[in-house]
Image: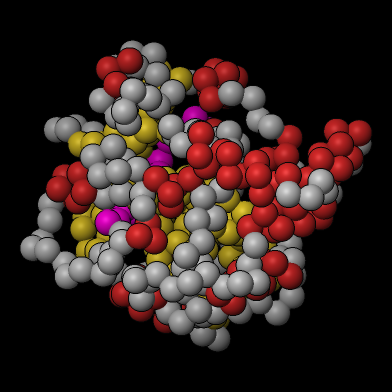
Amino acid sequence: MTARITDADTLQRCIGALPSPRDMKVIDHLDAWAVRWLQASPLAFFGFGDAEGIAITVGGGPAGFARTDTPTTLDLPPTRLDDPRLARAGQSFCSLWLVPGLGETLRINGQVAGVEDGRIGIAVRECYLHCAKALIRSDFWQAAPHPLAAPLTPVQAAARSRFLVLATVNAAGQADLSPKGDPAGALLQADEAALWLPDRPGNRRVDSLRNLLEQPRLSLAALVPGQTRLLHVRGTATLTTDAAARARLAVGDKPPKLVTRIAPAHWTVRDSAALAAAALWPAAQPPDDLAPAEIFKAHVRLNRSSGLQAAMVRAAVAVPGLVRHGLDQDYKKNLY
C-alpha cells in the first residue's frame, strides 16, 4: 500500500479546509434543543476509552431513556446498554443519538464522572448536531424490519452493512464517535488481511481521522438497517490515498479522497438487545418540534467563539431560510 497519510497537515489538505460554520456549531453544554433531542431518541451508540484505546456499545429502549438534570450532566441507565461494563469512571465518553425519521444525529462528548447507584454519570464537554449524509447514503429510515438471516461470518456482515459508527480516541484520551453510511459493498470491504473503509464528503472536521494519526486503535459497530445484528470490530488503522484502494470503493464515478485500512484484532457478529429494544423500523414520523436547521443556528449562536469571523458567521446563519437551503443543497449535491 502506498500514499500513506502520516500527519495532520497532509490529511487536512486531502480533505479540504474546515469551513468556519462547521466548527462553530459545537457548544459545551446541553441546550434546550439537545434536551428535546434526547427526549425523542430511542437509540444511541456509545464509546468509552482512554489513551490506550476505545470500545463501543449500544444503548436503546423507549424514547428518552437517558436523563439530564443539568446542562452539563447526562445519566445513562446501565440496563439499557448492551455492555455497560465498558463504562468506568474517568474514561473519555463519546456518543451519537438518533431520532426516528431524522437524518441528522446528535453528538455528545465528555467524561465518565461516575458509575454508581444504577447510573452511568457523564460530564458533558461537547454537544453538536451532525449532518444527515450518513443516514441518507445508507437509506437508514427507509428500511423495513425483517427477520435475521442465518448466522453470518464477519466478512459476510461487512459486505452487507450499510451504516456504521466509528469510535476513535487521540493520544490525550479524548474520544470521538462518527457515523458512516453507504450502499452495501461500498461501506466496508474485506480481504484476507484487512477491512477497508472510505471517507466520503462530510463536514471536514476530520476528528476521527486526526485521532487515528495520533493513536491508531479503533472500534466500530456496523449494521444492516432493519436488522438488530451488529458487526463489532476492534483493530488498528492506517490512512491512505492509494489509487487502487480508492477505486475499489468508488460509488458511481466518484472515489473517496482517502481510505482507512483496518487490521482487525478482533471482529465478531452478535445480536443487539439495545437495538431490538429501540424498535426503530418501520420508522415513526419525526417530531414536529425538532427542526435540524434551527438547531444548527441555535448552536452557532451559543458557541463561545469571538471575533470578527465569528460575528460574520452568526450574521450569516441569521438570514431566514439560509441554513435550511444550504443543508438541502449539500445533501443533494455533495453526498459523494
Q: Mark yes or no: residue 303 visible.
A: no
Which residue is rendered at x = 81% and y = 55% of the image?
Answer: 302
Which residue sits at x=65%, y=44%?
325
Q: Is residue 147 left or right of residue 221?
A: left
User: Which quadrant, please, contains the N terminus?
Assistant: top left
Q: 24 or 329: which is nearer to us?
A: 329
Task: Give how far across and how far down residue 67 sits, in percent.
Answer: 61, 79
Q: Is residue 27 above or below residue 208?
A: below
The residue sitting at the left extreme is 150
The image quarter containing residue 273 is bottom left
Q: Quadrant of the C terminus?
A: top left
Q: Looking at the picture, how far across and down is residue 142, in whole percent?
A: 35, 60
Q: Position of residue 177 (x, y in %)?
A: 50, 50
In screen coordinates, is 194 left or right of 31? left
Residue at screen point 12% across, 63% down: 149
Horizontal side of 150 relative to 290 (left or right) equals: left
Query: Which stretch appears magenta?
Result: 212-224
Q: Is residue 218 magenta?
A: yes
Foreground residue, 276 or 324? 324
Residue 99 drawn at (x, y percent): 51, 67
